[in-house]
Amino acid sequence: MNPKTGVLYQVILSDLRDEILTGKRRPHDTLPSENELSSRYNTTRATVRRSLAALEAEGLIRSWPGKGYFVEAPAHNSFTLTFSEDEPEDTVFYKGIHVIKADPHLQEIFQFPAGSRVIEICRTIQKKRVPAAYDIKYIPYEKGSPLIEREIDYAVFPEILAARTAPFSFYTKMKIGAELPSEQVARALHCDTAEPLLVVERIFMNKSKICIGYGRKYLRQEYGSLTAQSGYL
Amino acid sequence: MNPKTGVLYQVILSDLRDEILTGKRRPHDTLPSENELSSRYNTTRATVRRSLAALEAEGLIRSWPGKGYFVEAPAHNSFTLTFSEDEPEDTVFYKGIHVIKADPHLQEIFQFPAGSRVIEICRTIQKKRVPAAYDIKYIPYEKGSPLIEREIDYAVFPEILAARTAPFSFYTKMKIGAELPSEQVARALHCDTAEPLLVVERIFMNKSKICIGYGRKYLRQEYGSLTAQSGYL
DNA sequence: AAGTGGTCTAGACCACTGA
DNA sequence: CAGTGGTCTAGACCACTTG
């Protein structure tokens, strides 16, 4: 490694990346072949391939065996959204945690027979002493096993479920909507029933596509909204 | 390569991945060392490292030089959201495309001096002959260069901007909100002003953090809402 | 000092593409 | 057929962590 320019494979990587990001190489263009790059940088195919593999992982290029490497078109439609149930600086109040009979809506989500029971956990989240969000979670109730009161020890949803199963054994589907609050929610948030709220609905599924958790969070928008990003930098 | 089991590095990869996904190896556990895995699979470090690199790219493990590889905690707070301006099956109506003076809000976003002008593009999107979304876009107006009418040829925002710059040279920030529609929007969508709408705001920035495009899309929720995913499978 | 991962070389053989 | 990428071997030297 040259102390001035850094590690070789990263030099090649950032050279190629720059050429793509600045538009010198545009989507559908081909890149120089591995052999071409190897001799250009006085190195071996293995080192060049490291750079190309990294570029491919970033989604900037794709390889066609037998043909070469091609610049991809940027995915300006795919966004990364970060959603936390609550931030460290928030104050959380538990409004209640109890076992209830699943209503028809919950029965459908959990694919439960009539009369099944679920654990319901309600919370309000305050930002700077002002109610900013209201949160309801449902978990299947299993007779016997861990006491309901224990669930409260885990602040947020993924942790509750990770404790019940393996941490990687489920995934989440999110649905974002806009709603006017019900009387109950409006009271909890000290807001008017005419103030539109963001509603974030999450369904946690295991690998068998069985719902193992369901939650809704109602957000007042003055106190933090949902944001997402797409693209480089 | 063994024709029965497939390519070696992928065998190692899926072996390790399964052990993590099923919870046999849990977050903060260490993996066997590269040398250990090499001899266990009768191969070289290079091949083992390919598997580990792939696993690291998937975010399941992380390497600590001098220490080893460790299982990561799953990121259940990071979601992937797909947002398209319109789907192929939608019908799009251009309500107008013209140059206007930037109001204070737009001046702030684009960091424009007073009196600057922008191109405004308004559209309604119909799903099954029913107005489902209303869409406004703003682009800086540059005297001379490409005729305004040309912009209409490009259906969606990223393409308009890619034509003006390099396709990878900008990124997008999205903000999601809930709003009651203005009179104008309600008329365009044939809906009540009391019906809460989802509002998706996008700001397109170049590498110098200069805004090069701004858009708002108002969505009626009966006709498709926003969804996102997190986790494996 | 022994073990770990990080970088790199110099080969080899294979399947696939295109002229 | 020559050229491309895909897989793999068998070494080397380095910086870092740990006992």
Image: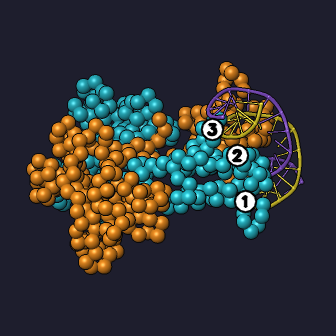
Chain colours: A orange, B cyan, C yellow, D purple
Question: Picture quarter containing residue A39?
Answer: top right
Q: Which residue is mark 2?
A: B34
Per the image, label 1 sits on a secondary structure element best described as: loop
**Kind of residue indicated by mark 2:** Glu
Residue B144, how many percent across, how many down?
Answer: 39, 32
Q: Nearer the viewer, mark 2 or mark 1?
A: 2
- From what the image shows, is residue B2 above or below residue A197? below
**Kind of residue indicated by mark 1:** Val
Disc with the residue nearer the chain's start (2 vs 1): 1
Mark 3 and mark 2: span between their CA atoms?
11 Å
Identify which residue, A144 or B160, lies in the foreground.
A144
Mark 2 and mark 1: span between their CA atoms?
18 Å
Q: Nearer the viewer, mark 1 or mark 3?
A: 3
Is residue B20 in view from this perspective? yes
Same chain for the residues at labels 1 and 3, yes or no? yes
Badge 1 density bin: few <14, some 14–19, many ≥20, Cα 10 Å: few
Identify which residue, A152 or B16, lies in the foreground.
A152
Mark 1 and mark 3: span between their CA atoms?
28 Å
- From what the image shows, is residue A4 above or below residue B92? above
Q: Which residue is mark 1?
A: B7
